């Protein structure tokens, strides 16, 4: 991706797409009557403004969730992913299963592998073949086409699913270290290991993007790519791609206008 392009992220909804840049967000949805509705604004939490690498990773993951209440307020017609009963039920079931695995006598390495599969597997299966998976594909195609200047596939190299490999690795290391802490300190050690694993995973993910031809980067990206390809994305319809492109254009408009305003407001040198 060229340096003059805005770095974008996104999230699929059951009836639309959210696209967000460093400072702004835009969400477009398809209404039941076939019409389109768009909302946009300034992000309440902006990880791009944080320089500390220790907290930047968790904040990058948290900023998308900080947007959800604003989207619900500004765009009531938006159907968030967690509102889909199958996905919500899968997530609850996954959380219960992960707790059982964590409390078992299995080795730390086996626990981490099972926990990773249980954390994403049921929700991925629930998404397969749904509108949510199709809008996820539309989001990737729209953003990828903008970034590369040519029509792209429904899989994207910066999809959050690619965090699966790094998170599996860093969580295994973190929990292995935490289990060596004294019993009285072990809960706090596990919590610290969890935060550290997220921070390390995001930084490792950034390295993977910059070194995509590196054998290690490819190996770490493989689980996430297969998850995208087989379960959590599907080929969108032209109408769904229209929704994604509308969100993309609105987000880019805000990011570009924001740069112009910042330049106009900057003090003379």
Image: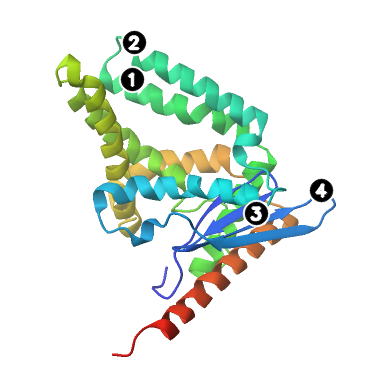
Residue 183 point in image, percent of width and height = 18, 15
Q: Which mark is residue 236?
A: none
Circle nearer the viewer, 3 or 2: 3
Q: For marks 2 and 4, give the CA distance.
A: 47 Å
Whether residue 156 is visible here, answered yes or no, is yes
Circle nearer the viewer, 3 or 1: 3
Q: Which residue is mark 4?
A: 32
Residue located at (49% from left, 67% from top): 147
User: Looking at this rendering, what residue extends furthest in the top direction?
Assistant: 105
Q: Are marks 1 and 2 in contact (CB under 8 Å)?
A: yes
Residue located at (20% from left, 25% from top): 178
Q: Is residue 94 above or below residue 104?
A: below
Between residue 142 and residue 259, name the one nearer to us.
259
Q: For marks 3 and 1, give the CA distance.
A: 41 Å
Between residue 145 and residue 258, name the one nearer to us.
258
The quarter of the rendered structure image containing the C terminus is: bottom left
Location of residue 51 by image quarter = bottom left
Circle nearer the viewer, 4 or 1: 4
> Label 3: few (<14), some or many (≥20) within 10 Å?
some
Q: For marks 3 and 2, give the CA distance.
A: 44 Å
């Amino acid at each position: 991706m060229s340096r003059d392009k805005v770095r974008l992220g996104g999230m699929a909804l059951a009836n639309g797409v959210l696209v967000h840049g460093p400072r702004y967000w835009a969400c477009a949805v398809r209404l039941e009557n076939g019409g389109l509705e768009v909302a946009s604004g300034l992000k309440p939490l902006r990880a791009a403004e944080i320089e500390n690498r220790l907290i930047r990773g968790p904040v990058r993951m948290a900023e998308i969730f900080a947007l959800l209440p604003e989207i619900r307020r500004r765009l009531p017609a938006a159907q968030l992913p967690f509102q889909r009963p199958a996905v919500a039920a899968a997530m609850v079931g996954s959380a219960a299963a992960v707790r059982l695995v964590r409390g078992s006598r299995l080795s730390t390495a086996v626990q981490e592998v099972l926990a990773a599969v249980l954390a994403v597997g049921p929700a991925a299966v629930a998404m397969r073949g749904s509108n949510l998976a199709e809008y996820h594909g539309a989001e990737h195609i729209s953003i990828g086409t903008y970034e590369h200047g040519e029509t792209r596939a429904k899989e994207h190299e910066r999809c959050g699913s690619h965090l699966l490999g790094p998170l599996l690795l860093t969580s295994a290391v973190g929990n292995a270290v935490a289990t060596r802490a004294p019993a009285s300190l072990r809960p706090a050690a596990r919590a610290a290991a969890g935060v550290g694993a997220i921070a390390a995973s995001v930084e490792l993910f950034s390295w993977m993007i910059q070194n995509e031809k590196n054998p290690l980067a490819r190996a770490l990206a493989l689980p996430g790519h297969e998850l995208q390809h087989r379960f959590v994305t599907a080929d969108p319809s032209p109408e769904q791609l229209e929704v994604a492109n509308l969100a993309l254009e609105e987000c880019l408009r805000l990011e570009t206008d924001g740069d112009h305003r910042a330049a106009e407001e900057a003090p003379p040198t």
